[in-house]
Amino acid sequence: MRTIRYVLIGLGNLGRRFCEVIVEKEALLRERYGLELMLVGAADSRGAAYDANRLDPARVAQIKQDGGSVADYPGVGRTGWDALALVQAVEADVLLEVSPVNLAQGAEPGLSCIRAAMQKGMHVVTPNKGPLVVAYRELHELAKANGVQLRFDGTVAGGLPAINLGARDLRGAVVQRIEAVPNLVTGYVMDMLAEGVPWDEALALARAEGVLEGDGSWDLEGWDAAAKLVILTNAVADFPATLNDVTRAGIATVGVDELVSARREGRRYRLLARAERQPDGGYALSVTPTSLPPDHPLGRLGRKQMGVVYTTDIYGVITAIIDEPNPIPSAMTMLRDVLDIYS
């Protein structure tokens, strides 16, 4: 039996769900993989907790469910202890970084936590898009220099293994085109609008379903899809794309009449992220609402489905789709990445 000590930064929907489910998986991890995952440190926006002997993830999840902070963890919680200070202080094997994206603030605190962890010799697993968008190449070089692994399969399309599929299973190929619907809420809202639901009501329903948070501009204006396309293009096509390379339009640019008309014709609008290989070997990147015919691989996606299509020179056209009714698949990508490192 091998014990893996981990630190968890970020206890929102994904971090809390991870804590809830990992308790259920303890027996399977022991029996199938010979691994014991031990939570030793956790941080949220109000504080942190650290216990070298173990924190109880079920207790952490309950504290968060009750509206508290991990700083309230009995005996070892500390108010005001920030995430970076925790990472610098703990002794652990792997960092699970799932703080908010925060691109407007330079992807902090996630970026600094990831740097600090790798410099200490810790592996890093993250579904946080921000650090990868801001510093994709730098972080990979830092991981290599410190002999650690950086895994980030959960940054694109929730629980869909889009990055693993592309980066691992398309090796040796030239990726001629990437098409992806990596954002769930935009399709959800456009489907509601096409059915006659007013904009404000569609957004309210999306919030009630837990697929839209805050004012929604990050998703609805296409920034989320653009960030995911940047990561996909770097990871799968090995092209150093940045957000500035993406031509972007949000779903508000499509009129309701267009959405209704497309639905009548059997077509479905989705916010399509696309990277097209150019004659010079580069890629043209775009995110735009697109009317997809039913014979397109992504043309029949449901409201809570996401997908990716890889068109290659030697492996044909490969499509992967996920139905994600709740945040659990997104949260548990961290487990998949941890197992990829240790098993």
Image (spheres, rainbow, N blue to C red):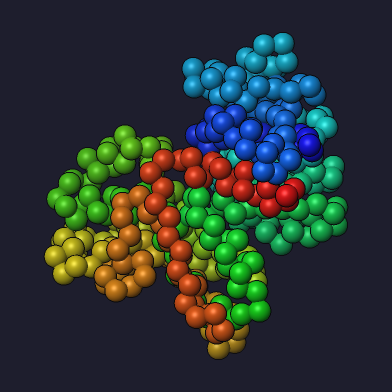
Is 286 located above or below residue 134 in the figure?
Answer: below
Q: Quadrant of residue 187?
A: bottom left
In the picture, measured across the screen, residue 311 lies left or right of residue 81, that is: left
Picture residue at 46% right of the left edge, 40% below the top: 327
Q: From this viewpoint, is residue 110 visible?
A: no
Q: Nearer the viewer, residue 66 or 222?
A: 66
Picture residue at 79% right of the left edge, 60% below the top: 141
Q: Nearer the viewer, residue 23 or 172?
A: 23
From the top left corner, tell me how far across and down residue 168 is, in percent: 64, 66
Q: What count of labels does the image hold?
A: 0
From the top left corner, tell me how far across and down residue 3 is, in percent: 78, 35
Q: From this viewpoint, is residue 263 visible?
A: yes
Picture residue at 33% right of the left edge, 37% below the top: 209
In the picture, measured across the screen, residue 35 lies left or right of residue 189, that is: right
Is 154 located above or below residue 77 in the figure?
Answer: below
In the picture, measured across the screen, residue 100 lies left or right of residue 168, that is: left
Q: Nearer the viewer, residue 169 or 66?
A: 169
